[in-house]
Amino acid sequence: SVMYVFKFLLRHITPEKFYVEACDDGADDVLTIDRVSTEVTLTVKKDVPPSAVTRPIFGILGTIHLVAGNYLIVIMKKIKVGEFFNHVIWKATDFDIISYKKTMLHLTDIQLQDNKTFLAMLNHVLSVDGFYFSTTYDLTHTLQRLSNTSPEFQEMSLLERADQRFVWNGHLLRELSAQPEVHRFALPVLHGFITMHSCSVNGKYFDWILISRRSCFRAGVRYYVRGIDSEGHAANFVETEQIVHYNGNRASFVQTRGSIPVFWSQRPNLKYKPLPQINNVANHMDGFQRHFDSQVIIYGKQVIINLVNQKGSEKPLEQKFATMVSSLGSGMISRYIAFDFHKECRNMRWDRLSILLDQVAEMQDELSYFLVDSAGKVVTNQEGVFRSNCMDCLDRTNVIQSLLARRSLQAQLQRLGVLHVGQKLEEQDEFEKIYKNAWADNANACAKQYAGTGALKTDFTRTGKRTQLGLLMDGWNSLIRYYKNNFSDGFRQDSIDLFLGNYSVDELESHSPLSVPRDWKFLALPIIMVVAFSMCIICLLMAGDTWTETLAYVLFWGVASIGTFFIILYNGKDFVDAPRLVQKEKID
């Protein structure tokens, strides 16, 4: 609503208060936060003391309570992503975390260290690329959802009407949310990926937009967050919307991805691929039904594309998913398609993906897409979505989603008269380059946010071909993923849980979860292995007086490093960086 427009903010700081004023919108309101009582009120510009230190900011992300007290998190830098139906979309690129307290003298050394760690966690989440916002447009809803709203909805603030699944600063804004009069200062921030391009085909110009919205429910990192929770929220759930704007006409095609919606885990244990474990005692049908109940209400018909392997360690999950679909009946799920991606495309036969596209073509035509003409009349609605998944809902999933989206786009552009009858979108070289790179960038963004590295298989998404260089890059990214999943993802998971409010800091708590000492083996044995392996290499490079002596050294240090490695591998869970803030559900 235009009522809530403002261009940017100024932050004024005094020892007693924070003042935040909107600029250039004719309003006199100033948001005032008392640094002692933490009370939030509305005042006017003349109440800001002349002595206040003034700095420009571009939005309030929210507030959070840590060991040292409350902190205000603000957006310090932004870059323009593009314009969306005359609304500007921004990416937040830099943040500041400001303490309400003017001194830390009230803290003990342990509290100071814990507070420093919690701040590092917040900074880590904020350093992950992909926070987007608009001061005038509701980014959390698809075009189809926005077209089916009441006048009362249109009058709500962006915060009130936002889809809470995609408001990543929802927890941080909880204090401002409780006071409707200050909502204009509280912007919902999306996490995911947005790209916008002005494109031309046959001399006809149109805007092409891709938006991926990551859910903040059951959010976390690969391996530590899998399956669903008791509310039916799936791990790594992402809603991806592709939009076309041409001559006032707007078309949209929506897809979803999300973890296999049963109770399962795959905890790191130093093995390259930990064995997935399905919970033997959980009520899978209860969680499964909750998941699809909400999906059907939001999106309509559900067509499931399950891309996991149908043999090896992934097979039980595919079988469980298929069994659950059969038990649920056809009321909620229109179709379940199991497509063993790796088997079908082995030996770099990626042309075989056409088998899957042909298999779902009729269903895709039936689901259709959303289209509203320049007069605002709804021409067609999208009747349901493809819900795709592989194990991580990243690499294989993104490839398939990009192909389904292209097929929908082909139909939309033909209907709008941009493409001539018989013309193929993939033959439009200039647009194809934009399209493929955008979907590859989307894959990378989602992968970095969940797995900590760029996506795999992006050589195919960018070029339409699988290459040897692409295989090498996938190997490198897999190696980085292995390291992060085992040795840094506990910290990453804790950071997300703190940011989203799954864990709240209690400064009166006598025992800090961060002060739990690591088992001596966690550091000692890996260090012994590294030293032994290093000495083995040094002995080879600096041969002694006799080869017998050198060989003896090499054998000694080699046996030491290999032996230590097997001790670590055998007791893998003792060495992985596990989360400490939130107790995850136990899986039998």
Image (spheres, rainbow, N blue to C red):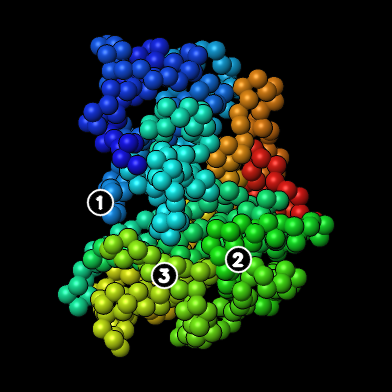
Secondary structure category for the residue under label 2: loop
> Count of labels shown?
3
Q: CA distance from mark 3 to mark 1?
A: 23 Å
Disc 3, disc 1: CB below 8 Å? Answer: no
Labels 3, 1: front one: 3
Viewer-proximal residue, 578 or 184? 184
Q: Residue at x 31, y 79 (%)?
A: 414
Sequence-wise first label, 3 or 1: 1
| Residue hosting label 3 | 380
Horizontal arrangement in the rendering, residue 342 relative to residue 160 (left or right)? right
Q: Residue at x 29, y 69 (%)?
A: 434
Q: Where is residue 206? Give x, y as percent.
A: 24, 67
| Residue hosting label 2 | 391
| Residue hosting label 1 | 86
Q: Is residue 439 above or below residue 265?
A: below
Q: Where is residue 342? Give x, y as percent.
A: 56, 78
Q: In which quadrant of the rendered image does the C terminus lie?
A: bottom right
Q: Where is residue 103? Give x, y as percent.
A: 46, 14
Labels 1, 2: front one: 1
Quarter where residue 282 is shown: bottom right
Regarding residue 10, the answer to whether it shows in the image is: no
Quarter where residue 250 is shown: bottom left
Secondary structure category for the residue under label 1: loop
Disc 2, disc 3: CB below 8 Å? Answer: no
Q: CA distance from mark 1 to mark 2?
A: 39 Å
Sequence-wise first label, 2 or 3: 3
Q: Amino acid at mark 3?
A: Thr
Viewer-proximal residue, 40 or 562? 40
Q: Is residue 241 above or below residue 170?
A: below
Could you classify mark 2 by the number of other residues whose Cα lies within 10 Å: few (under 14), some (14-19), or many (20 or more)? many
Horizontal arrangement in the rendering, residue 417 relative to residue 486 (left or right)? left
